[in-house]
Amino acid sequence: MKKSALVAALLALAASLAFAPTASAAPADTPALGCVQVLNLDKPPVGTDIDAIKRIAAALGLPGAPNRVGAACTTPQQTDAEHGEVNYPGHGPIILRNTGSARLQEYCTDSVSEPGATATLPGTDIITKGLAVIGSGCVTEPNPIAV
């Protein structure tokens, strides 16, 4: 009898999580940018030069270890459905999304950027032009605009 009660409790918990509203770690006043590509440095593409990214991030003054890179981040976006766009000052908290209707976003507690950068994305042959953003303290979360 105890085993069936435990199974029922686990099923109820799973069902409540499945239907829970999507929550975002990002505060409503966090700037959001659409990027041509966002790289997750926790799981980098083969050939990504992490050391070079760390050197660039340190030179730009990023506190903490970089764990996301956004390339050609030129499209301001709403943080969520209830709030408008927030201007990105070039550093600080940021939401990075792949341009388009991305299901996921990267919320970074800190970031630095380099405007007008023309570069090849690390580990790819994609050449980008525009704002490059390097973030630290980043987590992947659902994009509340796309949900």
Image (cartoon, rainbow, N blue to C red):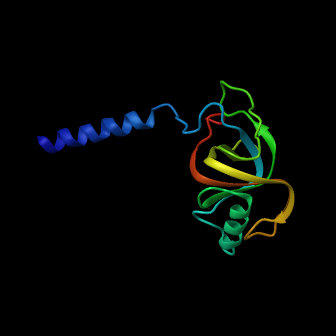
Q: Looking at the image, which residue is at 33% across and 37% down?
A: 13
4 horizontally vs 25: left or right: left
Specify the quadrant of the image occupied by residue 4. top left
Q: Looking at the image, which residue is at 77% across and 35% down?
A: 87
The residue closer to the viewer here, 69 or 99, is 69
Q: Looking at the image, which residue is at 62% across and 30% down?
A: 28
* Quarter of the image where the C terminus is located: top right
Percent of width and height locating residue 96: 69, 47
68 horizontally vs 20: left or right: right
Tag count: 0
146 horizontally vs 4: left or right: right
The residue closer to the viewer here, 98 or 109, is 109
Residue 99 seen: no
Residue 27 seen: yes
Specify the quadrant of the image occupied by residue 5. top left
Specify the quadrant of the image occupied by residue 37. bottom right
